[in-house]
């Protein structure tokens, strides 16, 4: 359906005037709307002019001014401005944001080979330059042997899941044994494939 509960829409009221309101419920072809003047309306969906909010509840975004990855929890109107409550991923704090403070978080599932512009191996760092203009950097920990395969696998993991990608490995692979490390690129690859399978992403376990 074009419209969903939680959307801010412009609609025609009973007198033919155009107003803005929040969709509270949808039943068949009728919509229950709470307008910006707090008046309730139960109208035909055909009387909705268009959806005004750029983002929807449940959508994952980035709050630009705070560099936070967030999930939209509520959409509302404040003095005829569209506003959002967003829940920060990781610290579980809720923030209030106007639309111009938010941007769509780039989708990371399904990274393709042609998404990579350049790979730089510079012990102890591995760097992937992506065609979207971003770069991902990982470094070998002191005392560990530099490995190109491991570095590239971790760069891809970081691109997929962000700076907290270690938590994904910890969740699905368990606690890392003290002073242990993967002995070969094959072990890194197998661990990464296992994470992708468990996450159920579009990669379908393929890396």
Image: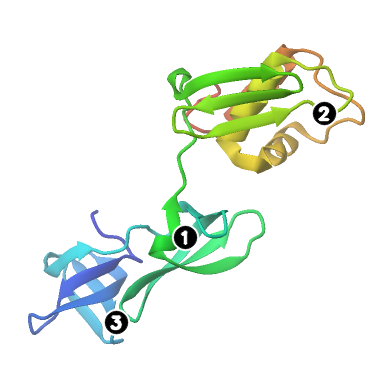
Res 179 → quadrant: top right
Disc with the residue nearer the chain's start (3 vs 1): 3
Residue 76, given in percent of the width and then of the height, sits at 38, 73
Q: Position of residue 191 (x, y in %)?
A: 69, 23
Q: Residue at x 89, y 23 (%)?
A: 143
Q: Which mark is residue 141?
A: 2
Of marks 2 and 1, which one's residue comes earlier in the chain?
Answer: 1
Residue 207 appears in the figure:
no
Dot placed on the residue nearer the N-terminal end, 3 or 2: 3
**Front position among marks 2 and 1:** 2
Q: Secondary structure at mark 3?
A: loop
Lateral position of residue 176 relative to residue 61, left or right: right
Q: Residue at x 31, y 70 (%)?
A: 25
- Identify the residue at image location x=24%, y=75%: 20
**Picture coordinates of residue 24 (x, y %)?**
33, 72
As drawn, the label of residue 180 is none
Distance of label 2 from label 1 (alpha carbons): 36 Å
**Along the horizontal axis of the image, is 105 left or right of 90?**
left
**Quadrant housing residue 51:** bottom left
Q: Read off the residue under disc 3.
A: 36
77 with respect to 61 (left or right): left
Residue at point 45%, 39% (across, down): 107
Disc number at residue 72? 1
* Residue 148 appears in the figure: yes
Nearest to the observer: residue 139 or residue 156: 139
**Helix, strand or loop at mark 2:** loop
Tell me if mark 2 has few (under 14), some (14-19) or many (20+) residues whose alpha carbon lies within 10 angstroms of its own.
few
């Amino acid at each position: 359906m074009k419209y969903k509960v939680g959307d801010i829409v412009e609609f025609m009221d009973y007198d033919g005037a155009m107003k803005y309101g929040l969709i509270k419920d949808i039943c068949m072809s009728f919509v229950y709307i709470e307008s910006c003047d707090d008046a309730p309306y139960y109208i035909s969906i055909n009387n909705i002019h268009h959806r005004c909010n750029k983002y929807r509840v449940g959508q994952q975004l980035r709050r630009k001014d705070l560099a936070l990855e967030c999930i939209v929890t509520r959409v509302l109107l404040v003095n005829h401005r569209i506003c959002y409550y967003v829940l920060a991923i990781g610290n579980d704090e809720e923030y209030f944001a106007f639309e111009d403070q938010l941007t769509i978080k780039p989708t990371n599932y399904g990274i393709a080979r042609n998404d990579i512009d350049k790979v730089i191996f510079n012990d102890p760092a591995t760097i992937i330059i992506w065609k979207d203009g971003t770069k991902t950097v990982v470094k070998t920990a002191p005392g560990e042997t530099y490995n190109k395969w491991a570095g590239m696998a971790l760069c891809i993991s970081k691109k997929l899941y962000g700076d907290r990608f270690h938590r994904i490995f910890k969740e699905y692979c368990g606690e890392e044994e003290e002073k242990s490390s993967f002995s070969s690129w094959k072990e890194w690859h197998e661990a990464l494939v296992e994470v992708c399978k468990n996450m159920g992403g579009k990669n379908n376990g393929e890396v």
